[in-house]
Structure formats: structure tokens, C-alpha cells
Image (cartoon, helix red, strand yellow):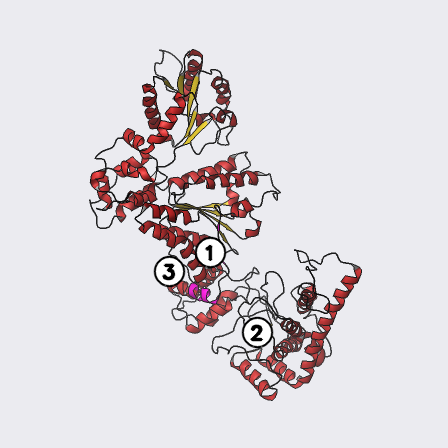
Amino acid sequence: MSIIVTEKELPKSLTPEQAVEAAYAQELADIASKLIRGLPVLVECDKELAPYLFLNVRNRLREAKLQCIYLDGRQRDPQQGAVPMGLIGTMIAQLRDAVRGAVERRVVVLPHLDLLTTSQGGLTGEAREVIPLLYENPELVWLGFKDPSFPLPKVIENLFPCWTGILGTSRNRLRQLVTQSESRKFGRDFSPWQLYKYVSGVNAVRLRRLLSTLEGEDYPADPKRAYSQIRQATLSGHMEIPSIDLEKDIGGYSKVKSKLRAEILDTLQKRDKATDPEEIARLEELIPRGMIFWGQPGTGKTYFAKAIAASIGAAITIVSGPELKSKWVGESEENLRQIFHKARQSAPSIIVFDEIDSFATARGTYTGSGVEHSMVNQLLTEMDGFHKDELVFIVGTTNFVESLDPALLRPGRFEFHLHIPYPDDDDRRAIFEIYNKKMKLQFTPDAMEYAINRTGNRYITSTGTAFSGDHLNALCRAVARLRMRENITGETTPKLIEKAITEFDEKIEVHEKDLPMVATHEAGHFLVSIFCPNHAPPEKVTIQSDMPWAPFFTQFKHEKKRIGMSRNEMLDQVTVLYGGIEAERLLIGDVSTGASGMGDPKSDLARASLFAEYMVEVCGMSNLAAPLRSFRDHKGDRQVLSGSMAEAIDRQVNTLIVEAQAKAAAILTKHKADLIKLRDELIEKKTIEGARVHEFIEELRARYPKDVGAPGPEVKLGAGAGTTTDVNATPDKKPTKKKDAE
């Protein structure tokens, strides 16, 4: 069977009744067969479709000489002077007459079951009067019509042992629903399979209405206009078609884009170009319908979902998880049902559940009212009800993928998992280039490099997180506002970028009396790192920073993420952390609170202790036997140990710290003259960076070739201040981003 049909193969005209027969002949025959056998049937369909389905079924039942009674609530022969009872009142009266007047088998049609239920699936007051009538006469066979967006209470559901869902149209029958004149709007090579992509969720009656209103010339060279009219007409609710280009509007993230293209977009593209029905069906089996986009806030999870929708011409609706919840019983599930129903009507479509973890956490872990359990069940039911040829995708975004219910993550549901991390250097460059062009910021090359470094993973935002895509957008808007306020028409410089970041931040000034102590402390970190071959070399040291959260710091060369660290590397990390306090002890003869941070868990001493404990308790880097299991639990707290084992661990931790402390003191004592020189220069210039750092290291290497560590990557001169980093990363499961050692 070809997916291209000739004009002569299509009908010349179609009435709505003929379209319903062509679209649902098999389903209607099945409904009539069950009714003739005395089985009540419930049909779930759109409201506008129900009358046409009834007419078709009635004609089939007439051939079997089975009478139908249609209880639509309309008064057919109103008595003169009678008081109108309204739709429901009339329907109840008709029902009473049908139940109590019937002596032979007949089919009673209930087209308005939704009027008997509340939006939460409960019974209305009138329904309580109706229920006894529904079960009173066993000779009656019921045919009910249910709107997909309304739940039915169990007492009504139980009346119907047979259910039939008629939602949308079948792809194989679509060629019977398009007339010859309508096909001309789609060009000479009309493909019902291509049209089906946009009308899979549209019922036959509505489809005929849409096709009959198509405008434009016959046999156009490009049928985009006709498809666009269909696409706009099928949008419902809050569905929209975004215009975000995956390449042009989203900078960087090459790995994320590659995975999306390879797993989703390329497969869909091959499906659209395929001409063999079997090949199309095979490709549809490969497309994951449920996706989880996870990552930190602001990294662009929803933005990527919009880009996918734009790439495939899909409508999108973004639903906030908390907005779905309701205090009324059943209303949360009803909200989900309506969202899925509208998405199917607007296919191809994407439903984005933002913060899906707010209701789809693992069952059994809820602490609320328990509505989440029902919502997860409803979500699974809706996803399992998709037809394979319907292009409806579900995207759940979350910051806590580990908290989601495992039933959601299994293959066949949310099987496609995409991690969207904080942007790396290349990503930030691409993002800045997009905003630089859109906002006409005129970044100089130095400004671009500065912006990339200044927002790197060794800096943190005012909220304590790394810079996300949203932060980069906010920074560029801040630069644009600053240029407007100061009437700047020329280029944007590094200084302007730093001003945009810190202009309104509360800055901490180092008191003049504290300058010698602070300069000595930072000079100690700086100098010790040079003589630790397993530590990254210094890049910058300052005691007068523009950053309010780091008034003074030592910055080191950035290394790409690695799998792990060796014992010697970790020891050098601890050694450099002790460089500050040992420099104070050597030159001043006293120590300050700088290394302890007055109990700050991010201070030099706290992190040095954490490193040493991690080496002993987790990594087996001590004289103790390597632990068969970690001495710490999943929260990072020490497990309950025997007194002797805890004492042995503490002794090994203390040995490592003493060893590192002694090494730092020995380095500084041997190179005391260089320490004094560096401290004095730092007090005078406040900041040492760039070429001067490179020169200082080379001077030491010339005098102590065996002592100075291996050189790091060459410093890029003229790029302004580099990125800051903590003296050592903290050995946690997830590396923390924090300021440099003070």
C-alpha cells in the first residue's frame, strides 16, 4: 500500500454521516453487535461526535428490529400550560417513562451522562434520583456516551460492562475522509499519512468541518499554507507552537543537541520521509514518547522542550506540577485527564510537566494528603493509553530525578533521560555570542573571554549556585541596561561586565590594619601551591576583589573534570589549604581566624579536615585496611563504629593533617624570603595576576628547578581577571562550587 493516493481514489463529496461511517465502521459494527446481544455499551467520544454515532448505530439496530429510545432531555410534545422542567428534569422524566413503560427489549440511549456527574467524578443531586432507575428494568439495554474530560462514578461505570473509545481517527481510514477538491490544496502528490500527523486526535465530524474551510490555490508548489491552516485549527486550550530554533536560539550544549537529534529528531525526520507503511510503523516503534529532562534550575530544560516542539511542528503546553494539585477529591486526576485529551486533539503535541517531582515522587514516600499517589496512577494510565501512531510526547522536568517513581522511569514510559548540566566554557561562549548579537552589546574579544571566565564553574552567583543559562541571560540584560544608563555606544569592555555583575552588591573592604595579615595568608596559599607538584599552579592572588562574596582569594588554574584524584594529589590539596595559616605563623608569629572562618564549613581548616577524613574513611588512603564499605552513610555522616575503630580512624586522619601541615611549614620556611617579597608586593599592588604570575613562577623555577611543580597551561595575557576557584574542591559525591580559600 502506497502512502500517496491519486485524486481519483478519493470521494467527490462527503456528508458528516458518511464520514462517520467511513471512519468508524468497525467500531460501530462492534457496538451494534454487543447491543443486539443485550450488552450495555459505554462510548467515550467528543460531544459533537455522539449524535452522529447514535444515528449510525440506530440504523444498524433497525435492521435487527431493535427499537431505540434517545433520552436527550428535549420536550417533544409539551402540554399546553405545562411548567418547563429544564433539560435534566425532562431527561429524568423521559428515563422514568422508558424504564417503567417498557415490556420488551429495547435500547435506551443516554447522550448526556456528564450532566449527572460533578467535575470530580461524584454524583449530582439529580443523579441520585436517576441511579435507581438505571438498575430497575433488566429488559433495557443501555447505550451511554461519555465525554473524555469527565470521569464517571463507579455506580454508573458498573452499568456498562463494555467500553469503546472513539478518539480521533485512524490513519488507515483517513484517505476516505478527504474529498478530491480538498486534496488539491495539498499539492498533486497528496499523502494522507503526512496529513495524519496533524489530525490524529481530530474526530471525523470535526475533520470534515476543518477540511471544508481550507483556503488557497489548487495544486500549490508548496502545500505549507494548507498544513498551516490545519495546524492552527487543531490547537486547543493553552497549546501553542513555539518558534525556538535548536541551533540558532540555544547556544552550545553540543552533546545535549546531538543526543536529541540522534534519539528523537532524526528518527522523526526519517519517519516523515519514509514511503513504505511498514517502514513508518517500524520507525514509530523506535520513538520514545516519554522524556525526563533533569538538571539544575535555569539550565534550559523547558527551553529544550520548546525547541523540540518547534523542530517537529508540535504544539506545546507547559504544566506546573503544583498547579495540578487540588484539595478536592478527584479534581487533580481530572486536571490530568483534560490536559492529555487536549494534547491528543492538538497532536503532534508535547506536554511539559514542569517540576514533575512535585507529584510524581516514588510512591510510599508521600507526606501530603496522598493525592500524589492517585496522580501518578492517572499519569501512567494516560501514557499507557497512547496509540503508537499518535505523536504526543510527554516531557517531565526535574531537579531531583532520583526522587521520581521508578514506575515512571521504566522503558515504555519515561524511557528517555536527558541531563542538562550547567554550561561549560564552550557553551557559555556560544550563549554569550547569541545574546551579544541579539542585544547588540558589542563585546570586545577581551570582554568575551572575561565574561566566559567570570561565569565559570569556579565562580558562584549571589545565590550560591554556578552560572546557568538564565544567569547568563540576566548578565547580558544587566550589561544592556548599564550601557543604556551610561549612554555607551561603543564597545563593551571587561570592566563594564564586572560592573554589571557587582555594581549594586554590598562590598566588603579589608581594613588597613588587616592588610598585612590577609596579604601574608594569601601569599602563603600562593607560594605553597608552586612547590606542590600535584596541585594546580596559581593564576591570581588578590586582597582587594570586586566580588562581594570573596574580598580576597587565591585563584588556581582550572582543570577539566577528572574521574578522581590520587593520594598525593589529595595530600597536596590539604598542604595548600594549610599554606595560609602557616605563613601567618612564620611571618607574624601569630595566627588569625582566617583559616577557620569562625567555624565556617567552607574554611581552610574545615575543608582540610574533610579531605583527610574522606581519604581515610572512604578511599582507604591510610595505614588502615581499605574499608569493605564506606565508614560514612548516604548522608555523609560517620557510621556507628566501635570505640577502637573510631580512635584508629581519628589517629590516621590526624597523621595526614600533621603531615600536610608540616610540609606547608617546611616549604614556607625554606622560601621565607620569597614569601616576604610576595607579601610586600601584594600589599602594594593589591592584585597579582597575568604576566606577573608567570614571571614570578619562572623566577622560582630558575632558582629551584627541582622544587617547583610542573608548569600548568600558559596564562592568557590581557584577558582580565581569570576565574576564581576554591583552593581545593571538597570531596563530596557532588563537587561543591564555592569561593577561594581566604
Say whether disc 3 or disc 1 marks the residue closer to the N-terminus: 3
Q: What is the crowding at mark 1: few (fewer than 14 residues within 10 Å), some, or many (at least 20)? A: many
Q: Which mark is residue 248?
A: 3
Q: Is residue 376 above or below residue 732?
A: above
Residue 660 coordinates in the image, percent (x, y): 69, 74
Report which residue position mark 2 lands on: 556
488 lies left or right of 528: left
Q: Residue 348, image x and y in percent?
A: 37, 45
Q: CA distance from mark 2 to mark 3?
A: 34 Å
Distance of mark 3 from mark 1, alpha carbons?
A: 14 Å
Indicate whether 461 appears above or below 582.
above
Relative to 551, 384 lies left or right: left
User: Three-letter amino acid code at disc 3?
Assistant: Lys
Disc 2 secondary structure class: strand
Residue under label 1, please give it: 300
x 50%, y 30%: residue? 121
Image position, residue 243 (x, y; %): 36, 53
Q: Residue at x 38, y 26 (%)?
A: 31
Q: Quarter of the image containing the C terminus?
A: bottom right
Say whether disc 1 or disc 2 marks the residue closer to the N-terminus.
1
Q: Is residue 647 magenta?
A: no
- Callout 1 amino acid: Gly
Dot 2 surroundings within 10 Å: few (below 14), some, or many (20 or more)? many
Instruction: Using the image, determine if residue 672 lies above or below residue 420.
Output: below
Give the label on residue 537, or none: none
Q: Which residues are magenta?
A: 414-431
Q: Is residue 618 visible?
A: yes
Q: Quadrant of residue 365?
A: top right
Label 1 – label 2 distance at C-alpha: 29 Å
